[in-house]
Amino acid sequence: MRSIGGLLSETPPVTTGREAARGAARHELSKPAYHQNDPGLVRRAMNRFWDWIGSLFEHASGATPGGTAGLVAVAVLVVLVIAALWWRLGTPRRSATSAGHLFDDRVRSAADHRTAAEALAADSRWSEAVQERMRAVVRSLEERTLLDPRPGRTADEAAAEAAVSLPSHAAALHAAARTFDDVTYGARPADATMYATLRTLDQALSRTKPLLTGPTR
C-alpha cells in the first residue's frame, strides 16, 4: 500500500512467469540437500533395467493368448525343446577347423602311433583310431625328412607341405586332413571305412619315393 495525494493505492503483486518459475524450482531441487538419500548410479541403472524387463514381460503377456499363463506355457515349451536338442545332439562343440594342432605335447614315433591306432580300431573306437593313424602318417613323413618336425603344425598344413614331394598322393593327403579335422573338431563320428582309407594311405606313402625337392621349410 502506498499514499498518492493522501489516497491509499494498492501495489500490484509481483508475478513470475511460468518458465522462470520452473527454472527456479529446478535450481532449488538440484541442491545436494535434496539428494542425500538418492540411490547410486548402479542402483538407478538396475532399477531401469528391471523396469524394462517388467514392461517387456507385460507387453509379451498381453500379446500371448492366455495372458501371463500362456506366456509361461510358451517359455516352458521352449525350455523343453532346448533340453531335447541338447540331449539329442550333445554338448555343442567347436565347428570343423584346421586351427587345432595335430600333435599334443608327447613326442611319439610313427610306429607308436600305428600301434595305438590298431589297438583303438580293434575296439571299434574309430574316431580315435583315425586320429592316431593320421598322426602316424605325418610322423612317418617327418622321420623320413619329407617334413621338418614343427610343433603346432595342423593336418591341413602337413598335407599341403607333404604334397610338394609326394604329388601323386596330394589329393589323398588333403582328404585325410579333412577327415582328421571333421572327426577331431567337427564331432563327426568316424567308421571302419574311414580308418581303412587312412591305413591304406599310410602304407602307400611308406612305399612311395618322393621327388627330390628336399624337406619342406
Image: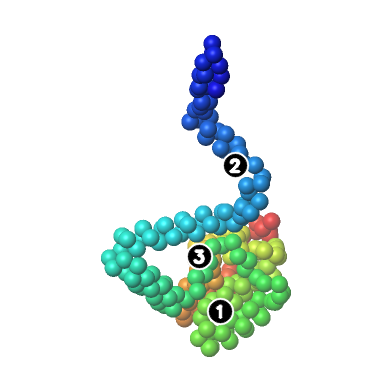
Could you say which disc has been placed on residue 76 in the image?
A: none
Q: Position of residue 197 (x, y in %)?
A: 49, 75
Label 3 close to label 1 by CB (< 8 Å): no
State the separation of the CA atoms marked 3 and 2: 58 Å
Question: Which numbered mark, 3 or 2, is in the foreground of this view?
Answer: 2
Q: Dot 2: within a 10 Å radius of its alpha carbon, few (fewer than 14), some, or many (20 or more) residues?
A: few
Q: SS at mark 1?
A: helix
Q: SS at mark 2?
A: helix
Q: Dot 1: within a 10 Å radius of its alpha carbon, few (fewer than 14), some, or many (20 or more) residues?
A: many
Q: Earlier in the sequence, mark 3 or mark 2?
A: 2
Q: Earlier in the sequence, mark 3 or mark 1?
A: 3
Q: Is residue 131 left or right of residue 188?
A: right
Q: Residue furthest bottom?
A: 123
**Residue that mark 1 sits on:** 128
User: Looking at numbered disc 3 in the image, what kind of residue is underneath it?
Assistant: Ser
**Residue 176 or 34: which is nearer the viewer?**
34
**Residue 87 or 186: which is nearer the viewer?**
87
The answer to whether residue 193 shows anywhere in this view is no
Residue found 54% across the figure and 13% down from its top: 6
**Residue that mark 3 sits on:** 95
State the separation of the CA atoms marked 3 and 1: 18 Å
Q: Position of residue 57 (x, y in %)?
A: 40, 61
Label 2 close to label 1 by CB (< 8 Å): no
Relative to residue 13, is residue 138 depicted above or below?
A: below
The answer to whether residue 68 shows anywhere in this view is yes
User: Looking at numbered disc 2 in the image, what kind of residue is underneath it?
Assistant: Leu
Q: Position of residue 89 (x, y in %)?
A: 44, 75
Q: Earlier in the sequence, mark 2 or mark 1?
A: 2
Could you say which disc has been placed on residue 29 in the image?
A: 2
Q: Dot 3: within a 10 Å radius of its alpha carbon, few (fewer than 14), some, or many (20 or more) residues?
A: few
Q: Position of residue 90 (x, y in %)?
A: 47, 76
Q: SS at mark 3?
A: loop
